[in-house]
Amino acid sequence: MTKQEERGHFMKDMIKMLDQTLKYERHEIVEDGIYIWVKSKRKILTCPYCGYKSRETHSKYHRTAQDLPISGKKSIYRNSEPENVLP
């Protein structure tokens, strides 16, 4: 197993421990930070305003969050979240 594959398995396990609803997609280490892409695994979405549940999505939005440094580098999480269709 290559170093890149080892890092991928580590990141996948770390994301799983942090949030069971997220799926690790990939990561990239650049000079100033570690960028980690994750995706929601939820199949049924609930509207936070009216409580309507739906399996259909009409769009996706992207969130970016910054966490504590890892090995002195910024850690940035990029999450692709689906938005549900309301009746």
Image: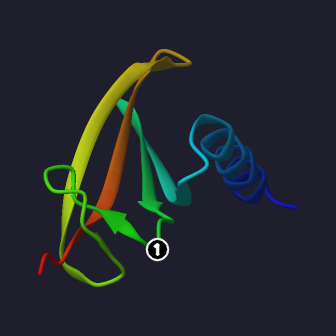
Q: Is residue 51 something that shows in the picture?
A: yes
Q: Is residue 31 something that shows in the picture?
A: no
Q: Is residue 30 above or below residue 39?
A: above
For the residue pair 3 and 75, the one nearer the viewer reads as: 75
For the residue pair 12 and 61, the one nearer the viewer reads as: 61
The single residue placed furthest to the right in the displayed view is 1
Estimate the x, y position of residue 32 in percent, counting from the top left.
Answer: 34, 29
For the residue pair 35 and 87, the one nearer the viewer reads as: 87
Q: Quadrant of the C terminus?
A: bottom left
Q: Residue at x 22, y 59 (%)?
A: 47
Residue 35's image quarter? top left
Estimate the x, y position of residue 44 in percent, counting from the top left.
Answer: 42, 71
**52 left or right, relative to 25:** left
Which class describes the residues within 10 Å of circle 1: few (<14), some (14-19), or many (20+)?
Answer: few
**56 left or right, relative to 43:** left
Q: Residue at x 70, y 47 (%)?
A: 7
Estimate the x, y position of residue 25 in percent, counting from the top left.
Answer: 52, 63
Say which element carries label 1: loop
- Total marks shown come to 1
For the residue pair 28 and 55, the one nearer the viewer reads as: 55
**63 left or right, relative to 16:** left
Residue 61's image quarter? bottom left
Q: Is residue 81 above or below residue 67?
A: below
Q: Quadrant of the N terminus?
A: bottom right
Q: Residue at x 52, y 60 (%)?
A: 26
The colour style of the image is: rainbow
Q: Is residue 74 above or below residue 55?
A: above
In the picture of the structure, the residue carrying the numbered disc 1 is 43
Query: Looking at numbered disc 1 in the image, what kind of residue is underneath it?
Result: Lys
Estimate the x, y position of residue 8 in percent, counting from the top left.
Answer: 67, 54
